[in-house]
Amino acid sequence: MNLETKDRTIPKGTVKLSLRLQTVAGFVRQGSRIADVGTDHGYVPVYLAQTGRIRSAIAMDVGKGPLERAREHIEEYETRSPGTGCPIEARLSDGLKELTPEDADTVIIAGMGGELMIRILDQGRHVWDSVKHWILSPQSEQYKVRAYLEMHGFFIEDETMVQDEGKYYTVMSVVRGTMEYGRPVWYKYGKILMDRKDNILKEYLEKEKHRVQVIVDSLGREDTGGMTEGQRKAMGSLRAELDQIKEAQNEMQ
């Protein structure tokens, strides 16, 4: 993982990012031209401009309210740092629809569920070949995102997991290329993280095992008169999830 900003002198007044967003920003390569999809307050583009990491940025959001907040932070940055040579534009856009191939070489998509991220990627096919680097942080259904990337000619070159305020987040560095995972457990938890025997993933798996086991035990105690069809299906799904967690843990020992 590339966290160059941690080794640089951070200018006074720089936006303070959460650990999750620091991790996202840390994957951005020096001199990139970025587009931040779902930018919300625009913190990541402003931070990257303030720390001298990027040449330009487009802060994109589908909501007018979040985009207005981003504009306010951009204007504050421009007032404090006139003539820095790093322009930041706020642009109203549903996903990548308003991004042109000439606009950016790096796209950040973070802070949304996996299904929505897949939809945004799919609707952004017009920039697939012009964008050289994708930084993705799905908050759910990571296995679907990994499977989609594999199916559509993307390659996860690096991946990390962080715990931030009690929640676990995965951040992927993605380029065009080919990969073949094949095993369900790799899609679910990340082949790179498992191969690395990532400590945060180990912690996450242990907590997930406990959470699922508690539910399984609870359903088992309630089964005094026989389970309904729905309960049997739920129990089967939970046990399969538990088996997959244990498979991942055994492989990472």
Image: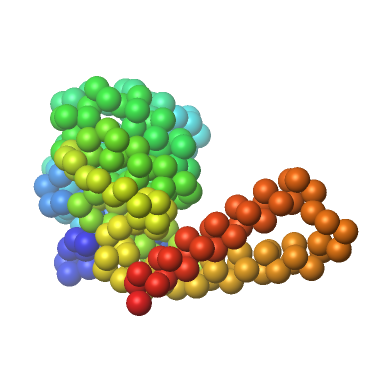
The single residue placed furthest to the bottom in the displayed view is 253
Q: Is residue 241 visible?
A: yes
Q: Residue at x 24, y 22 (%)?
A: 126
* Residue 138 % position (x, y): 41, 47
Q: Nearer the viewer, residue 149 or 70?
A: 149
The single residue placed furthest to the right in the displayed view is 225
The single residue placed furthest to the front in the displayed view is 226
Q: Exactly how many numbered labels are in the figure?
A: 0
Q: Quadrant of residue 14?
A: bottom left
* Display colour scheme: rainbow
Q: Nearer the viewer, residue 99 or 231?
A: 231
* Residue 233 % position (x, y): 67, 48
Q: Residue at x 39, y 35 (%)?
A: 118
| Drawn side of residue 54 relative to residue 187, left or right | left
Q: Residue at x 27, y 33 (%)?
A: 152
* Residue 112 % position (x, y): 46, 43
* Residue 154 % position (x, y): 23, 39
Classify 165 as above or below 37: below
Q: Quadrant of the N terminus?
A: bottom left
Q: Nearer the viewer, residue 114 or 47?
A: 114
| Drawn side of residue 79 relative to residue 208, left or right | left
Q: Quadrant of the C terminus?
A: bottom left
Q: Residue at x 62, y 68 (%)?
A: 213
| Drawn side of residue 141 relative to residue 150, left or right | right
Q: Is residue 34 visible?
A: no
